[in-house]
Image: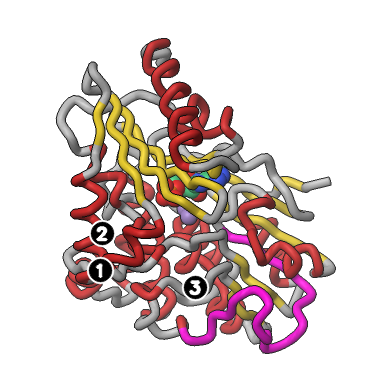
Amino acid sequence: MTRRVTIEELAAWLRARDGFALIGHVSPDGDAAGSCVAMAMALQALGKRAFVCLPGGMPAMYARYPGAEAVVRPGAPAPFAPRTAFALDVSDEGRLGDARALFDGCAERAVLDHHATNPGFGDVCLVDGARVATGELALELIEALGVPLDRAMATWLYIAVSTDSGNFSFSSTTPGTMRAAAKLLEAGVDVAGLTRALYRTRTLGKTRLLGRVLSGLEISEDGRMAWARMTDEMFAETGALREDSDGIVNDLLEIEGVEFAALAETRGAATKFSLRSKDWLDVAAQVAQPLGGGGHARAAGCTIEAPLEEALARVLARAKQALGEGKTD
Ligand code: AMP
Ligand code: MN
Ligand code: MN
């Protein structure tokens, strides 16, 4: 049974334990990576042993920030045998991917997350769907632990909060998000440097991939749904990395009049979807969840065990129905 806890209770739970494995989700993003690394640093500041494990490893775009070098992949040698698992930004056990054995193998397990679709797992669990990023919760937890924020920790938390909020632009951004950002700036975050690196710089491979994906864009007759495909050949031909798919779906959503955007990506025998809505459609509840996925109201995803065209047809049918049902809120 999972026990729901407050930030203070989670801090007390962590303070009483040691030997931590901090674990993020498959295809780790800035929030998963940033929340895990900052939390490892905070636990280490308390004199505890902690390491970060990310399924697939640290994304290349964050590899330059101090602390990234210590991150391990599932199955790789860990610095010690952990006894306490702590999953951050992981919306359900399936999203642990290859790190599931590490999580399950620990004597005790905690979960901190901001996905409203999270059913709750682990021994202790805190899910707050009103937060823009797990990094916002991680900052509060670090404060509750009494650990002073240093620049390295603040940089990782800024990566977490800024990436999940679309650089403080999505509707999920709250006054609390801005207050968290202010604290991170006070701790010395280089906003100009991070903004340039994270939002104003693209590898040549990703730029070419973007061109390929957008040139294959399709749109529904009523102009409310836009979708595109991303295949293995596109990655091979452009030299883009898998993580470069991050954010491309937003370019589809930016088309005038589009309410729903989907990016379909081949992943072995399965197809992975990035789903977005602009104004009112709840893509997590109305599209992703019925297809076995999850996420947030305006940004969600799912993986369907079927070839791309077949899987895409199912996603578009679901979205078309949801759009047809109209606004409910
Ligand atoms: P992405 O399009 O990969 O950036 O994902 C958007 C949001 O949907 C993120 O919050 C993810 O955590 C969530 N998400 C993506 N794929 C899945 C999945 N298969 N199951 C549950 N949540 C997902
Ligand atoms: Mn995430
Ligand atoms: Mn997140």
Mark 1 CB near ligand 1 (8 Å cut): no
Q: Are marks 2 and 3 in contact (CB under 8 Å)?
A: no
Q: Position of residue 251 (x, y in %)?
A: 22, 45
Residue 1, given in percent of the width and then of the height, sits at 84, 46
Callout 1: SS: helix
Q: Main SS of the magenta segment?
A: loop
Which mark identifies residue 314? none
Query: Is tag 3's residue or tag 1's residue first in the polypeptide sequence?
Result: 3
Nearest to N terminus: mark 2 or mark 3: 3
Q: Quadrant of residue 254?
A: top left
* Magenta stretch holds residue 70: yes
Question: Is 74 within the magenta?
Answer: yes
Q: Is 181 on the left-hand or right-hand side of 282?
A: left
Q: Which residue is mark 1?
A: 205
Residue 20 horizontal side relative to residue 265, left or right: right
Which residue is found at the position 39% from the left and 80% from the top? Answer: 63
Question: Gap between marks 3 and 1, in whole Å?
Answer: 29 Å
Tag 3 residue = 38
**Marks 1,2: beta carbons within 8 A:** yes
Q: Is residue 132 visible?
A: no
- Nearest-to-viewer mark from 2 and 3: 2
- The boundaries of the magenta stretch are 69-88
Q: Amino acid at mark 1?
A: Gly
User: Where does residue 282 sit, x and y in percent of width and height?
Assistant: 43, 27
Q: Could you tell me which secondary element the residue under label 2 belongs to? A: helix
Residue that numbered label 2 is attached to: 209
Horizontal and vertical percent for residue 245?
35, 56
- What amino acid is found at the position of numbered circle 2 in the picture? Leu
- The residue shown at (76%, 66%) is 101
The image quarter in which residue 29 lies: bottom left
The vertical placement of 318 against 266, above or below, is: above
